[in-house]
Image (cartoon, rainbow, N blue to C red):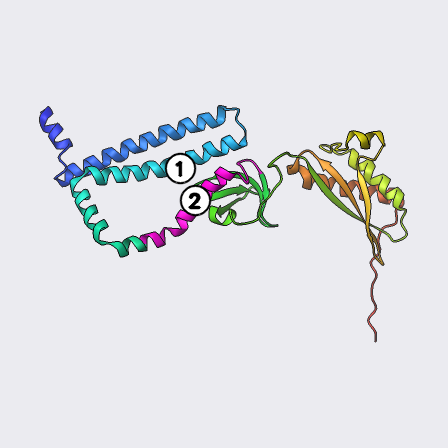
Amino acid sequence: MKELLFQYRFDLDSFSGILGYVLIVIFFSWIISRIIRSLMVILINHSKMDRYGRTSIQFFRNSIKFFIGLLCIIYIIITVPTFRNKAAFIFSGAGILAAIIGFAAQAALSNLIAGAFIVIFRPFRVGDYIKLDEARVGIVEDITLRHTVINNFENKRLIIPNSVISTDSVLNHTIEDSQILSFNNFKIGIKADINLARQIIQEEALKLPKVIDNRTPEEIIKDINQIDVRVIDVYPDHIHIRAYVWICEPFSEFKIKCALKEAVHKRFIVEGVDLPIPIIKRLAI
């Protein structure tokens, strides 16, 4: 009985034997893939490595399924005589087919290579806050063989092919440190007290959380104000002023800008700072 079972299990000349052998190889390949991927998840969750290391391991984890599946197919073709003979015939006389397959796989291959370059050269990492344009901005959630997943601030996922994102200009807010200089623009009336407006903006900015003091020791000794407020330009109907505020958390910049604009506007009204009045041009009759 044992001999019959052994012979049947490795009888690669019959359809049932080939089918059983292929299913067993696929099953063991799937088990190996799941074990390795699970170990990778444990390593990512419990390790204290930086973002570069976590990104590399996560990319390698995403690659495991693909490469083990590819090795599984190659192993089956090599070990099954029927498949091996057919493969030798196809590969020896199907140059045109190979060219067609290569052309069809060009996009997939370019995404794979681009993903590897992203992991190697590290323009961004998993967890980085990046911006491609006004519509594509958010936190890098995953880098797979084919695409990069970005979670925007509406909790929607942007799926961008690696070949696309690797050739675009990427603004990375957190590649070196998380401190950013936030530009906050305000408009006051043409006859407004600029010094009073500057003082109000500086006072309200210092009340906000995550606003940091980025002055040098020399600037602190000279008592240079922590919040720099400058007049950018003067227009017929308003004065454009800008506050330069250092923030330690780039993810909170939008909320801080909104909070500062609201607080400053309320102070402007209470303390009588002249607000801009739009000039209405009359049409000639």
The region drawn magenta spans: 101-128
Residue closer to the observer: 247 or 203? 247
Query: Quadrant of residue 42 in the image?
Result: top left
* Number of the label disc, if any, that sits on residue 113: 2
Q: Is residue 119 magenta?
A: yes
Quadrant where the C terminus sits is: bottom right
Residue type marked 2: Ile
Name the spot of residue 253 as percent of width and height, x first.
68, 39
| Residue 206 magenta-highlighted | no
- Name the residue rendered at 81%, 31% in the picture: 218
Sequence-wise, which precedes: disc 2 or disc 1? 1
Marker count (numbered): 2
* Image spot of residue 70 (x, y percent): 31, 40
Residue 63's tag is 1
Q: Is residue 195 above or below residue 238?
A: above
Kindly identify which numbered label has been placed on residue 270: none
Look at the image and tell me in which quarter the N terminus lies.
Answer: top left
Q: Which amino acid type is shown beneath numbered disc 1?
A: Ser
2 and 1 marks in contact (CB < 8 Å) = no
Disc 1 crowd rating (10 Å Cα; few below 14, some 14-19, many 20+) is some
Secondary structure at badge 2 equals helix
